[in-house]
Image (cartoon, grey):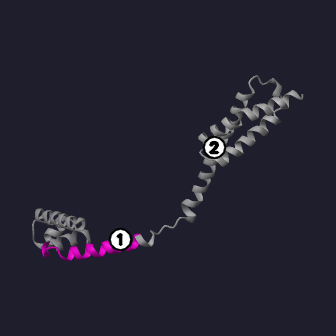
Amino acid sequence: MNTIPASIESTFQDTRKPLLQFLKRRLGCSHTAEDLVQETYLRVVQHESIEEIADLRAFVFRIACNLAIDHGRQAVTRVQSLKEPLGEDLVCPNPPPDRVAEASQQLDILGQLIAELPPQCRRVFLLHRVQHLSHIEIAERLGISPRTVESQISKALRILRDRMCA
């Protein structure tokens, strides 16, 4: 029975550095890799039928690999459990203040650009976009053809797009 602890000790000393490197590459975290190396050694020492293992080095790496897999699963579970409450309880539904300020500035600019549209173009555009009238309703109200309504809306959108992008 004294030979088993000696073989375990010598295997640990021989495999510690490569095992640590393996776990660091696999996990991407040296602290977690250190913890799992220690856990691996504990599990090997606590194994009841250690004398029946033919390749102790391979056994050590298999335990370490399984621990790394378990660690990954636990990390995924933790992240998923955090996402659920954050989704509704802790995330503010309002946009951040800088986005609100930027949007407000863009709306002011857009309002000014709409005011600068040619009169008939502006009227048609506002009736369509603000009052949600159809092309036919606008044509009847202004005494123009539906085709003219369509061309005035296209003209307004083109002018606004060009000026907003400039």
Is residue 144 toward the left or the right of residue 98 in the image? left
The numbered dot on residue 73 is 2
9 vs 132, nearest the viewer = 9
Where does residue 10 sit, x and y in percent of width and height? Answer: 78, 31
Q: Residue at x 62, y 44 (%)?
A: 72
106 vs 150, nearest the viewer = 106
> What amino acid is labelled 2 in the image?
Arg
Extreme residue in the right direction:
1
The local secondary structure at tag 2 comes to helix
The local secondary structure at tag 1 comes to helix
Q: Residue at x 11, y 62 (%)?
A: 147
Q: Give above or below for 29 relative to 116.
A: above
Residue segment shown in magenta = 99-120
Q: Where's the N terminus, which quadrant?
A: top right
Q: Where's the C terminus, which quadrant?
A: bottom left
Where does residue 106 sit, x and y in percent of width and height? Answer: 31, 72
Number of marks in the image? Answer: 2
Where does residue 55 sit, x and y in percent of width and height? Answer: 74, 24
Q: Residue at x 42, y 71 (%)?
A: 98
Is residue 58 toward the left or the right of residue 51 in the image? left
Name the residue that disc number 1 marks. Answer: 103
Is residue 58 toward the left or the right of residue 144 in the image? right
